[in-house]
Amino acid sequence: MIRSALLAVTAALCPLTALADDQTLDIAAPFELKGLDPALSGDIFLRLEIAETLVDSDAKGRLRPGLATEWTTSEDGLEWRFRIREGVAFHDGTMLDAAAAAISLNHARSHEGLLSRAPITDIRADGADLVVALSEPFAILPAFLAEYRSQILAPASYGPDGEVVALIGTGAFRTTEVSPPQTLAAERFEDYWDGAARIPALRYTAVTRSETRALMAESGDAELVVTLDPASVTRLSELEDLEVVSAPLPRVLMLKVDAASPFFDSAAEREALSMAIDRAGLAQVVLRYDASADQMFPPNMDGWHDAALPPLSYDPEAARALLEQAGWTPGDDGIMQKDGQRFAVELVTYPDRPELPLTATVLQQLFHDIGVDIRIVSSNSSEIPARHAAGTLQMGLMARNFALVPDPTGTLLQDYAPGGDWGAMGWDNPEAAQLIRRMASEGATPGDRARIAAIFRQDLPVIPIAWYQQTAAISDRVEGITLDPYERGFGLARAGFVE
Amino acid sequence: MRGLTGILAFRLAQAAGVALVVGVMSFLMIQAMPGDAAYRIAAARYGYDMVSSQAADAVRAELNLDAGALAQFGGWIADLLRFDLGRSVVSGEPVAHEIAHQLGATLHLSVVALLIALLIGPPLGVLAGLRAGGLLDRVLLVAAAGLRAMPQFLLGLVLIVALAVEAGLLPSAGHGRAAHVVLPALTLALGLAAGSARIARDLMAGIAASQHYAFARMKGLSDGQVLRHHGLRNIAAPLLTYLGLQFVFLAEGVVVVETIFGWPGIGHALIHAVFHRDVPMVQGTALVMGLGFVVLNALIDLAAGRIDPRGVTA
Amino acid sequence: MTLLKARDISVTDGRDRLVQPLSLTLRPGRALTILGESGSGKSLLAQAILGTLPKGLHASGELHVDDVALDPARPRGNRALWGRLIAVLPQEPWLALDPLMRAGRQVEETHRMVAGSADARAATARDLSELGLSGAGARWPWQLSGGMAQRLAFAAARAGGAPITVADEPTKGLDADRRDDVLALLQRGLRDGGGLLTITHDLDLARGLGGDIIVIRDGCAIEQGEAAKVLADPSHPYTRRLIEADPARWPPRKPSVPGAALLRARDLVVSRGGRALTGPQDIDLHRGEVMGIQGPSGCGKSSLGNALLGLLPVAGSVWRDPSLPKVAFQKLWQDPVAAFPRRLRLGQGIDDLVALHRLDASEVAPLMARLALRSELLDRLPAEVSGGELQRLALLRALLLKPAFLFADEPTSRLDPVTQAETFDLLTGIARERDMAMMIVSHDASLLRASCDRVLRLPDQPPAR
C-alpha cells in the first residue's frame, strides 16, 4: 500500500515536469491578472514589455516616441496625425501598420476608459499615419495614447465579437502562457524592433500576500519582487544576495473632504485639519520612510512641485485657533461645536492598501487632539467614488496616482475640473477648473503648473499627507532592472543575467 | 438491500437540493452585502485607481443591474437549466472555463496534499495505536495537537522559511513547476495528517484491544498477518468516512494556503468573487463545490459500504 | 503420553501470590477441567500457561508442551504455541470473529497461514460441513446465529491443527441449548485424541466433559480427582457448597398466589438504534408474582425491563397501576459496583435516601438484619465490601422505598455461585413476605426455572454494532 501511495505521489507531481531554469527571470508582484483585455490587465502587459503604446514616456514623465515616431496636430487642434514606426513586427509575424493601430484604439475607445471620455470623433488609418479627429482641441491626447489601455495589439488578437482573444503585442517578450489570475510566462521575441532582449524568458506570478513575496525574494525564487511591506524592507535590506530599491511615485496619500459640508466649507477649516496632522511622525510609524508631503505634488513631478510654496506644517495649537476663528467652540466633551452641531464626521477608507486603515487610526487620534471626532469606516475602494456620487461622503482617506496618464493633467481633469470621484468634492474654484481644462485642450506652460500647485496649497480641496515610494527587491543575479516612477516598466528589455 | 437505482435517485435528489440551496444562499448572501455592486465590479475590473462613477455607470448599463435581484436570479436559474453558468462579470470569461481552470489547480493541490497526509498520518497513527500509551503514541499526541492548533497561515510561512529560504530545497511560492505544489500541499497535509493520525490511532487502538483481534492472534497468525487481515481493513471504513468529512477542512485550508502560496485555485477565486460581487462566479463556484461534496460523499459511502457491508445489507 | 505438562505454575502481581504453585497434566483424549468461582484464579492459571497474562502479572514454574520446554516467566516464547500446538476457544464467538471478513475466510486463513495447508479452501469446506455450517461460509459473522458463530469460531481456532484445546469459560452467558452445543464441540476435539483444558464454573459442563477436575479457590487447588467422583462425592466442604449452589439443585419454588394486577403491557416492541429487539409482547404482572426473562446477552432483556419501568420509549402500550407512586417501581442493577458512588460512605447514601423520601429511619436496622447485613458495613466505602454484600445493600436501598415491583437485571451475574444461591433465596423470600412482584433477567434457564413462577424466553440476536 505504501509503495503504491509513493507511486501516486510521484505521478501527481509529474504532470508539470518543467524544471526550474536559470534562464527565466521570475517576477512576483501583488497585481493579479484579470484577463487578456488591456482594459483589465494592460498595466501588467506594459510593465512586462509584452505590448506597447504609440507614445512612450521617460522617467520624468516626458513623452517620447513609442510605436509612433512622431506626431503633429492641425492648426485648429482638431486633427492629430501619428506617424507609425516602420519595421515593427507583431509576435505573430504580421507587421504593424496604421490600420492595425486604428483597430486597437477603436477597441479601447468603444469600451469604458480614458479614450471613451476624450473628445474623439474618429480614429482611422491614412497611409502610414494614424489620424485622430476631435470635436474640440485636446492637447493631452498624446499622453492619453501613452496610457496602458491604449496599447496596440495585432488585428488577430480580436475575436469576431471584438473581444480580445489572444495577446499579440509588439513588445520585447512574447507570451507563452497566460493563466489568470496568477501566472504569465513569456519568452524573448527575437524580432523585436528595438533589438532582442538579453533575458531569454520571464515568468510573472501574482502573489497577493506581501509576506510570501518577501520570502520569495529571500529564497531566490523570484529575481524581481515588486511592492514590499515596510517590515520586509528592513529585513531584506540586510541580505547580501539581493538589493532593495525604491523610487518615488507620483502617488499621494491624501484626505478628501466634502468642501460643501458645514465642517469643511472654509479653507481655514481645511487648513486646521491639515495642521493637526503630524506628517513626519505618521510617515515614520506607518510607512516607515520619510515621505511626508509638504504640498500636493512630489519633487519628482517636474514643474508641478514648487519648492517655494509654504510647507504644510504640524501645529495643533494653531489648528484649534483656526477652528475657533471659524466659529467652532469646544464642547463639554472636548469636541468642537458650532450651532449645536458636534464636529463629528465619518471617514471612509479601504484596506486594499494596508497602510490606509492604519493611517486612519493615527488620524483619529490626531484629530481628536484638536476637537474633531472621526468615525472610521474601512470598506472597499469603490466606496469612495460611490459615496461621492451619492453625496454621502464626508471624508475619504485614499491614495491617488497622478500618473495614470504620463501627463498629470489627465488625472487633474477628471478630479479637479471642478471635482471628481477621486478628487475635489463640493469645491468651487472656477480659476482652477478653467485652468486645468485649458491645459488639457491647449497644453500647459510651467507657470500653469505652478499656479495649480499654489491654488491647491492655498485652498486645500484635498489634504495631502504623504508621497508614496515604490519598493522592489532585485536579486544580484540580474543587472539593469530599474524602477520607473511612472510604473510603465522595469527596463526588462535591457536587463540581463549577470554572467 | 436498497436498490442501486434507489441510491442513485437519492443522490440525484440530494444534488438538485444542494444546487438550489447553494444557489439561493450565495445569491441572497451577496444581495445582503453592503455597497453598490456596480462600483464593486468596476473596482474589480479596472483596479482602484480606475474606478469612477462613469465606469460604474457603464458596468450597470452593461450588466443591466437595475433590472433587480429577482430578474438576475431568474436568469441564473434559466441558464443553469441549460447547463450554462454564465460569464464572470469581472473577467468576462465563461464561469465554467474559470472554474475548470481553478478547480483543476485546487484538485491537483488537494490530491497531492491528501496523498502526503495519507502517507504520514494513518501509518503513524496505526503504529501508535498498536502500542497505545507508548513513546510514539505520546509524541504523536503532542505533535498532532500542536499541528492542529497552528494556524495554516503561520504553518505555511514556517515551512517556506524552513524548506525554501533556509534549506533551499523547494520553491517558496508560485505555480507552474512540479515542485511548486510540494510546500502548499505539505501545509495542507500536515493538518490533515495530524487529524487522520489521531483517528487512525484511536481506531487502531480500539481494534487492537478488540476480542476479534486477540482471537486472530490466538489462531496463530503473525502480528503482520493479523494487522493486514484484521486491522487495516477494519479501520479503513471509519477512516475513509472521517477523511470525507475532512474535505471540508481541506476546502477551508485551501482558501488560506492558495493565497499564501499564490496558487491559482478555486478557494482563492471564491474569496475574490465574493469581494468583487461577481455573482455568477460565486454561484458557479459554490455550486460546483457543493456538488463536488455530494459526489465525494456518495463515493465514500460506496467505498465504505464495500469495505464494511454492515448497515448496507442489514 | 502427555500433551502438556505444567509444574508448579504460580502467578504473582509483584506483591501477592494470586495463584499458588499448581501442577497439571493433559493427556490425549482426556478432559481436564479447572472448576472455580470468579476471582478464584482459574483464568490466571490458563493465562499463565498460554502466555497471555495481563501487564504487571508474572508467572513462574515449568511448562512442557509437546516435548518443548517453555519458561512461563518469559511468555514471548509461548506465541509459537498458539494455533499450532494450542487452540484457544474464544468466550464470546460473535465478538471473536472479525465482523468484516466472511465466515469461511476466517477458517480458511488459519488453514493457509497457520497450518500451511495446500488446499485451504477444501479443508475449510470440510470443516464447515462437518460442523453443519455448509453454505454459511459466504455469510458475514453478524449474519450467523449464536450457535453457528460458536461452531465457526471453534473451526477457526482449531484449523491450525493444534492437538490441545484451551477453553476459558466457554459457556459464560449461554442458555442450556447453546451450552450443550459447546459441550458437543469440546467432546469432538477429545474424540480426535486431542487434549482439552477447560476453565469454568459451570458444573453441568464439567460433568459432561468428564475426565479430571481441579477445584480452585483463592488461587489454591483444594481438591482434584476424577470428575465423576469429585462431583458425586466431594471431599472438601467448599466443593460441596459449590455443588449445592447449582440452581439445578435448588428446592423447587412454591407457586405464588397472584394478587391485584400491577402492570400490563400490550404489543410491546422494544427497539435499539431503530432495530426491533423483541417481537410484540403481551405481559401481565400481579402482586406477588415472580417472572423470569431469559435470553442470551444482547437480545434486549434489559431494554424490555427498562421499557416496563418507563425508562425507555416503546411501541405498544404499558399500563402501571396508577394508584402507586413512581418509586414503587424499582430496579436492581446488574453491576452493584457501578450503582454506588465510589467515594461516598454507604451509610451516607442510605441516610440521604431516607431524608430525600422522608422514610422512617427506624426501618433500616431490621431490614438490614433481614438481609444479613452487619451495621458496621455502613461506615465503609463501596470498594471495601464484597460483591454479595454490595448487591444486598442495593437491595436494601430498593426495599426501603417499599416497592410493589422490582426489576432485577442479572442481579447475580457478577457473584460467585454460592453467593448467588444466597442472594436468590433472599430475593424470592422477601418478594413473598412483602407481596412484591418481581421480574428477573438472566441467561441461566435453570436459575429462572428454580426461582420464577413463569419464564419468558427472548430469541437470539447478534450483538449490536
Image (cartoon, coloured by chain):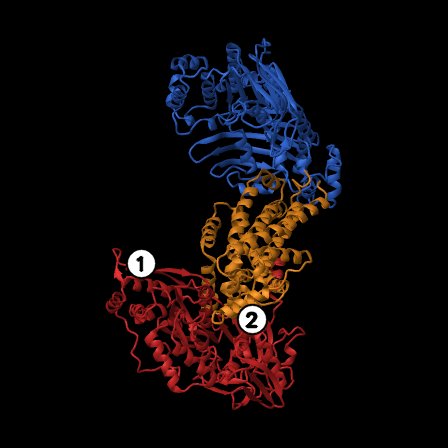
Chain colours: A red, B orange, C blue
Q: Image height check: is C317 above or below A430?
A: above
Which image quadrant for residue A21? bottom right
Q: Image height check: is C178 above or below A234?
A: above
Count of marks placed on residues: 2
Query: Toward the viewer: C7 or C377?
Result: C377
User: Where is residue C285 shown, x and y percent of the image?
Assistant: 59, 15
Q: Earlier in the sequence, mark 1 or mark 2?
A: 2
The residue beneath circle 2 is A183
User: Where is residue A18 shown, x and y percent of the image?
Assistant: 60, 72
Q: Is residue B192 rendered to the left or right of residue B74?
A: left
Quick one: label 2, few (<14), some, or many (20+) residues within 10 Å?
many
The residue beneath circle 1 is A342
* Residue depth check, mark 1 versus mark 2: number of the one nearer the observer: 1
Quadrant for the N terminus of chain B, please.
top right
Q: The residue under label 1 is which amino acid type?
A: Arg
Query: Toward the viewer: C239 or A235?
Result: A235
Which image quadrant for residue A415? bottom left
User: Where is residue C381 shown, x and y percent of the image?
Assistant: 40, 26
User: Chain ID for label 2?
Assistant: A
Q: Is residue A350 visible?
A: yes
Q: The residue under label 2 is which amino acid type?
A: Thr
Secondary element at image label 1: strand
